[in-house]
Amino acid sequence: MPVSPAPPLSLTLPVPPEAVLLSKIEDGIARLTLNRPAARNALSMGLLDALERALADIVEDKTVHVVVIAGAGPAFCAGHDLKELRADPGRAAYEALFNRCSTVMTRIVRLPKPVIAQVHGIATAAGCQLAASCDLVVAADTARFATPGVNIGLFCSTPMVALSRAVGRKAAMEMLLTGDVIPAARAQAIGLVNRVVPEADLEASTMALARQIAGKSPLTLAIGKAAFYTQVELPLDEAYACAAEAMTRNMLARDAEEGIDAFIEKRTPHWTGS
């Protein structure tokens, strides 16, 4: 009696989880896209870890001159992942998360390359903190910002650090004490946002700004950004001393010589980053 052949084996391979952070580098611009759309790109520990690694890599990547941080799906970032917070309700877990978040935010400020937030949908709590930590913010006209922790019994104390350095004290306190959501136009009026554009033009407008900045000397940008954040925290005399040192260092750079010569000779400068 003939033996029927055994049916072919069917193997179902596990589908790898989608990356929580997408990274793309093109024309000197690194685009980092928060990729937890179902969670409104809430800042889980995994996403914060991925952001920290990406920013650390960008420091060493000489091809990157500008960074854009955006969000996938319907929102920029809804803050911390509250489900993750409640899943491990202990001091050690809370301290680890908030310390990691603070590390990421300070890394953005200290990154020797300009960082632009491309904001759509909502930027709330730590999402507002993320936008405020970036050097520039381009927002869709439909975007909304808030530090609403007070509404759930959790004051937005760490977002407060970035917010209070980006806007005036009264405006920051109003956002923190009321938890109210403010539209992009109001966010621009108080200094949290640089540019408000139609939602359909958001990415194109952000990338146009990024390309404009990427065309400058990377060394000059690095010197200038570091000096800006250092002097703004200093008393007046110390701030001027800091700025004078930065100007001197900048003037001694080859890129400053090239830029001045190119201006005098009415030609396009060629930056070497030195």
Image (spheres, grey):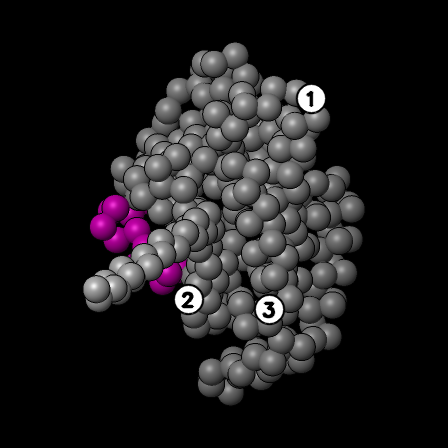
Q: Residue furthest front?
A: 1
Q: Is the magenta stretch mostly helix, strand or loop?
A: helix
The earlier-in-sequence mark between 2 and 1 is 1
CA separation, marks 2 and 1?
Answer: 43 Å
Does residue 184 appear left or right of residue 238 in this picture? left
The mark closer to the camera, 3 or 2, is 3
Point out residue 91 in the picture as x, y percentages from the top left corner: 69, 21
Q: Is residue 128 visible?
A: no
Asked which secondary structure carries label 2, the reply is: helix
Residue at numbered disc 3: 61
| Residue nearest the viewer, comparing 249 with 70 | 70
Residue that badge 1 annotates = 91
Judge whether residue 201 is colored magenta: yes
Looking at the rendering, the stretch of residues picked out in magenta corresponds to 195-209
Q: Point out residue 154 in the picture as x, y percentages from the top left corner.
A: 54, 17
Report the residue marked by disc 2: 211
Residue 130 on image: x %, y %: 51, 40
Amino acid type at image mark 1: Arg
**Nearer the viewer's eye, disc 2 or disc 1?**
1
Residue at position x 55%, y 18% in the image: 155
Q: Disc 3 and disc 1: Cα gap in Å?
A: 36 Å
Marks 3,1: beta carbons within 8 A: no
